[in-house]
Amino acid sequence: MLLVDRETMQNIDSYAINEIKIPSLCLVERAALSVMENINLDIRHSFALIVSCGNNGADGLALARNLLALSKDCDIYIIGNKNKASKDFIINYNACKNLTKNIYSIETIEDMNFLRKNLDRVNTIVDGIFGTGLNRPVSGIYANIIDLINEKNIYTISIDLPSGFDANGENNYGTYVDSDLIVCMQILKKGLYEDNYFKDKTVVCDIGLPQIAIEKFINI
Ligand SMILES: NC(=O)C1=CN([C@@H]2O[C@H](COP(=O)(O)OP(=O)(O)OC[C@H]3O[C@@H](n4cnc5c(N)ncnc54)[C@H](O)[C@@H]3O)[C@@H](O)[C@H]2O)[C@@H](O)CC1
Ligand SMILES: [K+]
C-alpha cells in the first residue's frame, strides 16, 4: 500500500504542475470528478458545499459546478477571504456565480445561525475546507463550522482529508470533520491509513499525477 506524508504530497503536486506543466486546474477538475463518481446521485439530491479559499476549496467549487450542471440543488458556503483565494478557486467561483445565487460567505455569528438552519434542507454535506494545506491548529470560525458539521446528522463527504485532520497523523490540530466518506487524491495519506476510524471510510482516486512525478519523491 503506497502511503504519502503531507510534505511529499505537496512536492509531488508542485513538481507535476511546475516541472511537468500539468495545469493545476486539470488536477482540480479530476479531483472534483473523482468525488462525484463516489456520490450516488439517485439518492443524493441536495448539497451543502462548505469550502475555504485554497485548492481543497477549489476542488469543492469544481464539484459544485459539475453538480449544478446536472441541475442538482447546491448551496455553497465560503469561509475565509476570497481576495486571497487560489486562482483555481477563483476560476470555479466565477462559474458557480453564474449558475446559482445560493452562494454565502460565513463570517459572523448571524452567518453561523443561517448555516445551522439552512443545513437542514440538504441530505449531503461536502467538506472542502482543508486538505494537505492544513498546517496549524483549527480555531475561530473554522472550528465553529467543523463542530456544526459534526452536530448535524447529515451524510458528509470530505475532499482529500477530513478538514482539521493532520495528513501525517502526527499533530492534533483540535476539532476535525467526522466524515462518512473521504475521497483521497491519488495517494493514501499516511495519517488516514494509520487511523482505524477513517481508514475504512477512505477511497483513493487517481487524479492524473504521473508516475514519474510520484517516483521522483517516493521509492516504489
Ligand atoms: N494544485 C495542487 O496542489 C492541487 C491540490 N489539490 C487539492 O488542494 C489541497 C491543497 O490545497 P492548498 O495547499 O491550497 O491548501 P488547503 O486548501 O488544504 O488549505 C487552504 C489554506 O488554509 C490555510 N490554513 C492551513 N491551516 C489552517 C488553519 N488551521 N486555520 C486557517 N487556515 C489554515 C493555509 O494557508 C492553506 O493554504 C489538497 O488537499 C487537494 O484537495 C488537488 O486539487 C490536486 C492539485
Ligand atoms: K477536506
Image (tube, rainbow, N blue to C red):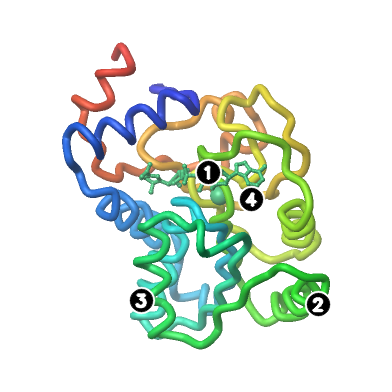
The picture places residue 162, in percent across and down from the top left corner, at: 61, 45
Do tag 1 and tag 2 residues touch (Cβ < 8 Å)? no
- Residue located 77% across and 38% down the image: 174
In the visual, does 161 lie left or right of 98?
Answer: right
The mark closer to the camera, 1 or 2, is 2
Label 1 CB sits under 8 Å from any ligand 1 atom: yes
| Mark 3 or mark 1: whose residue is earlier in sequence | 3
Numbered mark located on residue 110 in the image: 2
The picture places residue 189, in percent across and down from the top left corner, at: 49, 30
Question: In the rendered structure, which amino acid carries the disc numbered 1?
Answer: Gly
Question: In the rendered structure, which amino acid carries the disc numbered 4?
Answer: Ser
| Mark 4 or mark 3: whose residue is earlier in sequence | 3
How packed mark 1 is, by other alpha carbons closer than 10 Å (few <14, some 14-19, many 20 or more), is many
- Residue located 24% across and 27% down the image: 213
- Residue located 59% across and 64% down the image: 50
Distance between the alpha carbons at the discs numbered 4 and 3:
27 Å
- Residue located 62% across and 38% down the image: 198
Give above or below for 170 relative to 103: above
Question: In the rendered structure, which amino acid carries the disc numbered 3?
Answer: Ala
The picture places residue 186, in percent across and down from the top left corner, at: 35, 38
Numbered mark located on residue 131 in the image: 1
| Mark 3 or mark 2: whose residue is earlier in sequence | 3
Distance between the alpha carbons at the discs numbered 4 and 2:
25 Å
In the visual, does 160 lie left or right of 88?
Answer: right
Label 2 CB sits under 8 Å from any ligand 1 atom: no
The quadrant of the rendering that contains the C terminus is: top left
Q: Which residue is mark 4?
A: 179
Question: In the rendered structure, which amino acid carries the disc numbered 2?
Answer: Glu
Element on which disc 3 rests: helix
